[in-house]
Amino acid sequence: MSVVLTDVEGLIAHLADHPASPLAVQLAVHRLDQGDFAAAAQVLEPLTAACPDYPTAQLLLGQALLSLGEYDGATQALGQA
């Protein structure tokens, strides 16, 4: 079953039950656009742990961590992208 959600509240509700869902990327992009880098990283960490070969998630996590000044984590995530 494929789920496509566009509203933030729907994404948050879906991720509460499915934290490693690829839909986390949509919410992370929203959080990054808002400048909430910590929230973006928090959303992406379960996804990248469950799907380490998901380059978009790794790239976004690297971007969020870089913006937070977490250079080691950013380097690791970007290296896996």
Image: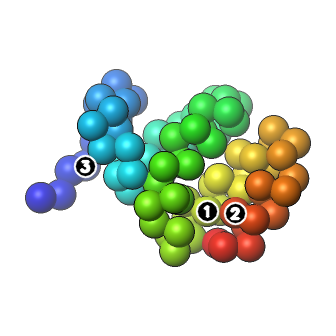
Tell me the quarter of the picture where residue 15 sits.
top left
Evaluate whether residue 33 shows in this view. Answer: no
Q: Indicate which disc residue 58 carries.
A: 1
Q: Could you tell me which residue is drawn at 61 percent across and 62 percent down?
A: 58
- The residue lying toward the viewer, choosing from 63 and 48, is 48
3D distance between C-alphas at marks 1 and 2: 5 Å
- In this picture the colour scheme is rainbow
- Upstream in sequence: badge 1 or badge 2: 1
Residue shown at the point (74%, 73%) measured from the top left: 79
Q: Nearer the viewer, mark 3 or mark 1?
A: 1
Q: Which residue is mark 3?
A: 4
Residue 76: x %, y % from top left? 75, 65
Report which residue position mark 2 lands on.
Answer: 77
Q: Quadrant of the N terminus?
A: bottom left
From mark 2 to mark 3, how far is it between C-alphas?
26 Å
Residue in the foreground of this view, choosing between 4 and 43: 43
